[in-house]
Amino acid sequence: MSGSLAIGVDIGGTKVAAGVVDVAGRIVHRTRRDTPHRSTSPVVVEDTITDCVDELLTVVEDPSEVVAVGIGAAGFVAADRATVVFAPHLSWRNEPLRDALQRRIRLPITVDNDANAAAWAERTFGAARGETHVVVVTLGTGIGGALILDSSIQRGRHGIAGEFGHMQVVPDGIRCECGNRGCWEQYASGNALVREARAMIEAGSPVVAEMLGRLGGDRSALTGPFITESARAGDPTARELLADIGNWLGVGMANLAAAFDPGLFVIGGGVSAAGEMLLGPARESFRRHLTGRGYRPEAGIVRAELGSDAGLIGAAELARSGR
């Protein structure tokens, strides 16, 4: 079928992942590069993106089948979907990324925030298929997200909607990297999970003895995935820490439900690998804090299905569909 393929490029802090995606959301060819984060020149990242696209076009049987290129960038993308206003892990500051790439890639180019791209992939091919009102929450080092209402991504007046991690949930709470205090991501993210575990260890709490034993004395190995694996192995303290994160996740989702009334929450990101150890407590907390609880329909809460490929797939589909 003519025009059945698109290229998606997902730009993160450590890697640039790219792939050719068909109309069913399948990645039929893929490549990746390390993100050249040490460079202060935006051109170096643009070189990397162009190199990925050129490589993929050489492996496609019929390059004319590729109709567009979608870029998902970790950062603030302006409402024009052409300019990266700010990318915390790259040197982009008001960078006209689409125009810079358009001079080098002879295909239509779409630029969007990586969370928007991932959300669109989940809505089109993943956990939110068929749902018209979706909030996607990505739990990693911090908290990102995206909002779909009436089957359309809501990017906001300036293109920066979906920064849910910086809602204030605790007045005068823990200082956040953004400069404010009490942001949601300080209580329900991978960083929060590790911080709380480290605090218990440094306090000499006996309840972390099992976790310390698993660390083998190497406290630098204390990471979110380590805590999740400890919980799977039955460590009660690790399970308690995940439940605490889940509780705060539920609080934030209840706030979002009050504002947007979604039909479904989709939870992605690395911390979501904890599955029901996280989502079970989150659902309980959500019900306790939901405005009008008992007298309104309750949104579902599910884990994302597409994993780390969601941003790539969604960027390609947004470019192909022109959404």
Image (spheres, rainbow, N blue to C red):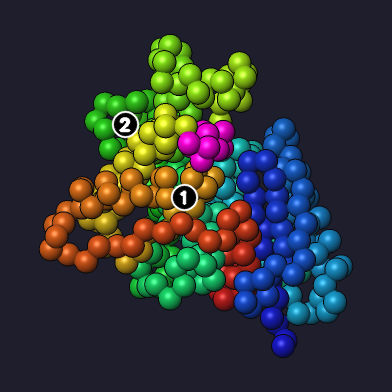
Which residue is pictured at 70% across the width and 50% down the height? 16
Which residue corresponds to mark 2?
A: 182
Residue under the image location 53 percent in, 37 percent down: 233
Quadrant (top left, top right, bottom left, bottom right) of the N terminus: bottom right
Q: Is residue 29 above or below residue 272?
A: below
- Residue 124 appears in the rendering: yes
Report if residue 302 lies within the magenta region: no
Residue numbers of the magenta segment? 225-234
The local secondary structure at tag 2 comes to loop
Mark carried by residue 275: 1
From where the camera sits, is residue 72 visible?
no
Amino acid type shown at disc 2: Gly
Which residue is outermost to the bottom?
1
In the image shown, does 314 or 281 lie closer to the viewer?
Answer: 281
Disc 1 secondary structure class: loop
- Residue type at tag 1: Gly
Horizontally, residue 270 falls left or right of residue 7, namely left
Instruction: Count neighbours of disc 1 (C-alpha within 10 A) and say few if under 14, some if 14 to 19, many if 20 or more.
Output: some
Q: Nearer the viewer, residue 152 or 134?
A: 134
- Where does residue 72 sit, x and y in percent of width and height? 60, 56
- Gap in Å between the C-alphas at discs 2 and 1? 25 Å
Residue 30 spot, x, y in % from top left? 76, 61
